Amino acid sequence: MDPLLIIISVSTLFFLTVLLLYSLHFLNLLFSQSGEGTTTQPGGGMNQQQHKQLPPGSSGWPFVGEGIEFYRSGLAGIPEKFFFDRFRKYSSEIFKTSLLGETVIVIGGTASGNKFLFLNEGKLLKASWPPSVRKLLPINDSGSHENNFKAIRTTFPKYLNIEALRSYIGTMDSMTQCHFETHWDKYMNTNEVLIVHPLVLKYSFALACRLFLSMDVEQEARRVNELLNLFVVLTNGILSIPVDIPGTPFNRAVKASDLINKEIVTMIKRRKVYLLSHENTPTKDMLSLMIKFSDEDSGKFMEETFIAYSIMALIIASHETTSSVITSVMKYLADYPEVYNKVLKEQMAIAKSKETQELLTWEDIQKMRYSWNVVCEVMRLAPPALGGFKQASTDFMYAGYHIPRGCKLYWSSIASHKNPEYFPDPEKFDPSRFQGDGPAPFTFVPFSGGLGTCAGKEYARVQILIFIHRVVTRYQWEKAFDAKDEEKIIFNPFPSITKGLPIRIRAQRQDY
């Protein structure tokens, strides 16, 4: 091909690309100014609000907003930099940005900001999700909104409360030991390298399938693995820019979401038949609880699609976050031998108080105080979720700025956790921060707060502590890579270790 034609073609393509970007940028500014200048009132009218000052900030590039910088800081292992740079540039309490295809106002990084957001949910604010989550898990679009969410508020706490957890601990403990026997013991004392994160992901997902869906994870191992692979694809695209074009993470996530939903709906239909023929059988899992729930006033049951998407959301929240925390805990225990020894001493004391093969109990979990301090410090440095979204239910003022009704807001856990005002020398790993009364209220927020507090907080605590008990009393481990190849924790969107944490394991000494 003629070189001159190549130059002309490239130049034309570049010109068209620039023209498209500027056109999109103009439209973005036009629509954002239109949205910022008016507020929809309950009666449907539009009142001008241009005289009210909105928070400072930038909308970034057309469509992608400042998402590239947000992701870049996460992949660099310093997600707090995105927030701290803007707090310094615009305001120490609030700024405007554009993430995941939406303009959002960030409030956070301070105890007062977190307190305001958490305690005003249900008053000035309501829970919200970015466009990608709403499209992949369209719970709001399934049937009666109020009836469905009343069901969630009723069933989730009933299944995840302390009383219920007491009855699951034996199953969780036995499954944990079975997991080690099947997937870890073959690496023991062999000098072969074990990659922690994929195995922990497999473990936590199997646990969720067993407890939430009553799947026989041993007999249905292939089916569980197929579901896990679909959930991995879904998770990789759940906080991406919602561009549904073949080849994009979001497009792959859409396909995975549809397949998972169909699979769970099939389970629901089968379970309904079983429940009708076994009316006196106790309700033992989340799936049965949701199927049997009916609204007191209307008598309506939840739609099958809504139940399926709700279960999907619960599984993502339960297995993805706990697996990332467990992997990070093992990394920090390998990095800090003195911390590891304290955890080992605490767990060995519990092990020696029990008979051989005796399972852990709720009382044993309560004795793991130092181990939980270690987990909390890990979640401070690498929170399972970087933050969350909310939406303004009405106009209000915050820090001297106008927040219009309908506006999306974002709070950042990592900005609070890395704030030196609350955590001196914030990069230092120091579990003693959580001794006694621990951090000040609303500064340590890995599970959110207020009405939005994660319903699975205690479930996660029990699962993580059971895993820690069994892994430290069963194995010793060391990282299997050179110092020059040191791994780091990145966020995409959940915290993960760049190579999955390769380690070598050997049998634990029993003379402690």
Image (cartoon, rainbow, N blue to C red):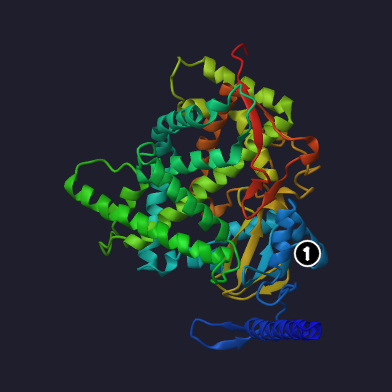
Quadrant of res 79: bottom right
Q: Residue furthest front?
A: 1
Above or below: residue 454 compared with residue 506: below
Residue 38, horizontal then vertical, whole percent:
62, 84
Looking at this view, is 365 or 330 the one in front?
Answer: 330
Q: Residue at x 54, y 38 (%)?
A: 199
Residue 392, horizontal then vertical, whole percent:
58, 70
- Dot 1: what SS? helix
Above or below: residue 469 compared with residue 411: above
Above or below: residue 330 compared with residue 24: above
Q: Residue at x 59, y 23 (%)?
A: 475
- Relative side of 148 to 408, left or right: left
Identify residue for label 1.
86
Residue 232, horizontal then vertical, whole percent:
52, 52
Above or below: residue 385 compared with residue 136: above
Q: Is residue 150 visible?
A: no
Q: Is residue 415 visible?
A: yes
Quadrant of res 70: bottom right
Specify the quadrant that holds the C terminus.
top right
Specify the quadrant that holds the N terminus.
bottom right
Looking at this view, is 231 or 300 the one in front?
Answer: 231
Q: Residue at x 74, y 37 (%)?
A: 429
Q: Residue at x 70, y 32 (%)?
A: 479
Q: Indicate the amino acid at tag 1.
A: Arg
Q: Residue furthest left?
A: 277
Quadrant of res 301: bottom left
Residue 25, horizontal then vertical, whole percent:
71, 82
Q: Residues within 10 Å of mark 1 (few under 14, many from 20)?
A: many
Q: How many marks?
A: 1
